Image (spheres, helix red, strand yellow):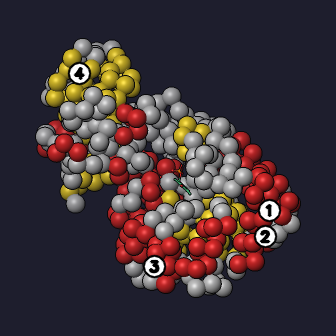
């Protein structure tokens, strides 16, 4: 892996013709230590946010030893990447292929599975030969109203179904868990407090003992127009809710952050190939690392990478990606100096979660080029002096 000091250094020294992914292991390690030390329970990394083996090793070395995997390919990937280490895999997709469950259990030693229906419970029991050493987590449906990206409609048992499901799962499981997901980029700690109230209602209704409360992912990162309160506030709200549950004395608390552990890990450097008014044609887009920017209008921070800084006023730009598809369009607005022009390089930040990992090769535009840098990410939730009830720090480059 090539190393450079900074994003600007990469752009000026290499003048790359294809997009470059920058990685910042120090930022991921900092996020991992933060969760490992401050979350009042255990933190599992949700691998789908970014399955890079380098990132997985970095997180593991910084205290994240449990991994939320959702496909047999993710099971194999983490098992291979951390072979010989004391890592634990939890298969937290509520609808799995029977073959995937069997391989996870018999080949890779996975004992923790999630489910949201009796059908899935029966499937897990069949695939594992009625194993008696299972940790089974029942996924509840909870509201996504505080989150930028809903995860409320696809998975999760409804209020009326949880009683029967919890009782049946209690019978089958060595350890019974309850899990949920409040939706990604949850902008308020209230999302977790509300969901934990749902958990309370379900426990009381089914009158079961519970061994694991898993509050899922959804912890935010920081983007233009989306600056959450400090993560300590989330941890406090979760801790308070958990402590007030009737099962808190005997159960473990888990969470499954994806975005919050990986967003700061990567950014990309793109080149402007053409300018048309306030539209910039850049060499990465919807089929590359910018799926969310194109399809759900997500705004990412941008910086012009020029040795001589522009002193022009900032202006809002939209981007076109490199493919021939009209949908390869990112409305932004992305704020850049007004004199940005063809040939300029731009860094697009905070792409470590659901960005760099989603690149396709559509239309022949893709790039394997990855360079490690040791400058700061364009924004961070993990500044050195993060205190509760303070807003997140935005670290400016340059
Ligand atoms: C996607 C997902 C996560 C991670 O969500 P983030 O919003 O990235 O933190 C965690 N758990 C489950 C079950 C998921 O599907």
Instruction: Confirm or deny contact between disc 2 and disc 1 (CB under 8 A).
Output: yes
Residue 58: image x %, image y %?
40, 64
Q: Residues within 10 Å of mark 2 (few under 14, many from 20)?
A: some
Residue indicated by mark 2: 167
Label 2 and label 4: CA atoms lie apart by 62 Å
In terms of secondary structure, where does tag 3 sit?
helix
Asked if residue 41 can be seen in this view, the reply is no
Residue indicated by mark 3: 103
Asked if residue 246 can be seen in this view, the reply is yes
Residue 183: image x %, image y %?
59, 45
Compare marks 2 and 3 and give the one earlier in the sequence.
3
Q: Residue at x 78, y 65 (%)?
A: 164
Q: How many marks?
A: 4
Residue indicated by mark 1: 163
In terms of secondary structure, where does tag 2 sit?
helix
Label 4 and label 1: CA atoms lie apart by 59 Å
Q: Residue at x 44, y 57 (%)?
A: 48
Q: Residue at x 62, y 85 (%)?
A: 131
Q: From what the image shows, is residue 362 above or below residue 212?
A: above
Q: Residues within 10 Å of mark 4 (few under 14, many from 20)?
A: many
Compare marks 3 and 1 and give the one earlier in the sequence.
3
Label 3 and label 1: CA atoms lie apart by 30 Å
Q: Identify the mark at residue 340; answer none if there is no mark.
A: 4
């Amino acid at each position: 892996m090539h190393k450079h000091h900074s994003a600007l250094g990469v752009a000026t020294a290499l003048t790359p013709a294809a997009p470059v992914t920058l990685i910042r292991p120090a930022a991921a390690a900092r996020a991992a230590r933060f969760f490992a030390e401050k979350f009042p329970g255990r933190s599992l990394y949700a691998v789908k946010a970014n399955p890079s083996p380098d990132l997985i090793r970095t997180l593991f070395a910084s205290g994240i030893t449990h991994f939320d995997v959702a496909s047999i390919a993710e099971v194999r990937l983490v098992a291979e990447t951390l072979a010989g280490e004391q890592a634990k895999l939890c298969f937290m997709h509520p609808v799995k292929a029977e073959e995937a469950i069997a391989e996870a259990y018999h080949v890779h030693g996975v004992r923790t599975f999630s489910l949201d229906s009796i059908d899935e419970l029966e499937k897990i029991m069949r695939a594992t030969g009625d194993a008696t050493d299972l940790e089974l987590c029942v996924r509840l449906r909870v509201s996504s109203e505080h989150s930028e990206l809903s995860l409320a409609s696809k998975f999760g048992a409804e209020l009326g179904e949880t009683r029967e499901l919890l009782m049946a799962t209690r019978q089958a499981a060595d350890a019974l868990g309850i899990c949920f997901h409040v939706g990604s980029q949850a902008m308020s700690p209230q999302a977790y407090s509300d969901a934990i109230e749902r958990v309370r209602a379900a426990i009381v209704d089914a009158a079961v003992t519970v061994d694991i409360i898993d509050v899922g992912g959804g912890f935010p990162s920081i983007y233009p127009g989306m600056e959450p309160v400090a993560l300590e506030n989330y941890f406090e709200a979760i801790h308070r809710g958990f402590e007030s549950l009737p099962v808190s004395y005997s159960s473990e608390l888990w969470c499954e952050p994806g975005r919050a552990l990986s967003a700061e890990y990567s950014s990309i450097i793109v080149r402007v190939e053409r300018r048309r008014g306030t539209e910039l044609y850049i060499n990465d887009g919807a089929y590359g690392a910018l799926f969310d920017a194109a399809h759900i209008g997500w705004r990412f921070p941008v910086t012009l990478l020029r040795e001589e800084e522009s002193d022009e006023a900032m202006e809002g730009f939209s981007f076109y990606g490199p493919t021939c598809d009209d949908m390869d369009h990112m409305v932004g607005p992305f704020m850049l100096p007004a004199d940005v022009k063809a040939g300029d390089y731009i860094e697009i930040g905070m792409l470590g979660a659901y960005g760099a990992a989603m690149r396709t090769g559509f239309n022949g535009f893709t790039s394997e080029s990855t360079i490690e840098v040791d400058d700061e990410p364009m924004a961070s939730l993990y500044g050195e002096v993060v205190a509760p009830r303070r807003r997140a720090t935005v670290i400016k480059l340059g």
